[in-house]
Amino acid sequence: MNKPPDAFIFMKVGNHAGESFESILRRKNEEFKKAGKIFWGYGGTACHPITQVQPFVNIYEKENGSVYVLMQEIDSRAEPLIAPAKQYSVDGINWQDIPDGINVIGSRYALVLDEIKSTDFDINPQEFEIGAGPSAGKNAEDYMKGHIDKACLIKSNKNKENESPKVKKIKLAAKLIAPYAVLLKGE
């Protein structure tokens, strides 16, 4: 991939739960080798697995073939509780044990990914809008000001002109695979 698709999940990534980003990537590569998928943990209120990510992917996967998560590496200061997830749920009702080989630490949710691959391109958030959730239709650049670190984005037909767009450097990407996003719990 050398340019952004028309629909994707944008996520800022970095150090997490006392672990360096390089260590996380090594661990996630091993996870993929052992389990054939990656649970990429996250938290916050944006990109809820059931109400935002799953419906977003179901819609845009039909149109685009696959939906990807595009990752912008940042200097993260996130220091959540380091409790490992023990179970996951696709629907918030039925819970299953985390598959062997998967290790998710300090997260409420997880994106379910194929292999994480290196890439190198920029995205201009002015060209995209929020594609799911209560802020659907809002310009991505306006939405991602401050501490917003993830969003379901779609190509916008609204032209927002700003002399100095806040371009995001994308170095990593991964395809979302079914069930796309899950809830996590420790016990």
Image (cartoon, rainbow, N blue to C red):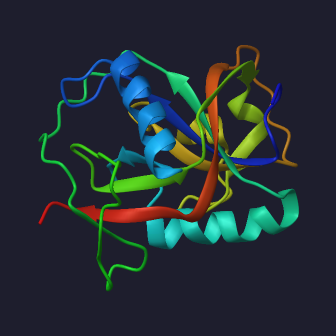
State the residue in front, 181 or 59.
181
Could you say where residue 24 lies in the image, as x and y percent from the top left?
Answer: 36, 27
In the rendered view, would you say 14 is above or below 137?
A: above
Give left or right: position of 88 versus 144: left
Given the current orientation, which residue lies at the most extreme front position? 34
Residue at the spot 39% in from the left edge and 23% down from the top edge: 14
Quarter of the image where the C terminus is located: bottom left
Number of marks: 0
In the rendered view, would you say 35 is above or below 19?
A: below
In the rendered view, would you say 75 is above or below 183?
A: above
Could you say where residue 1 lies in the image, as x and y percent from the top left?
Answer: 80, 30
Residue at the spot 27% in from the left edge and 56% down from the top edge: 108
Residue 133 seen in render: no
Give left or right: position of 20 versus 84: right
Could you say where residue 142 lies in the image, as x and y percent from the top left?
Answer: 59, 37
Give left or right: position of 185 versus 170: left
Residue at the spot 57% in from the left edge and 30% down from the top edge: 71
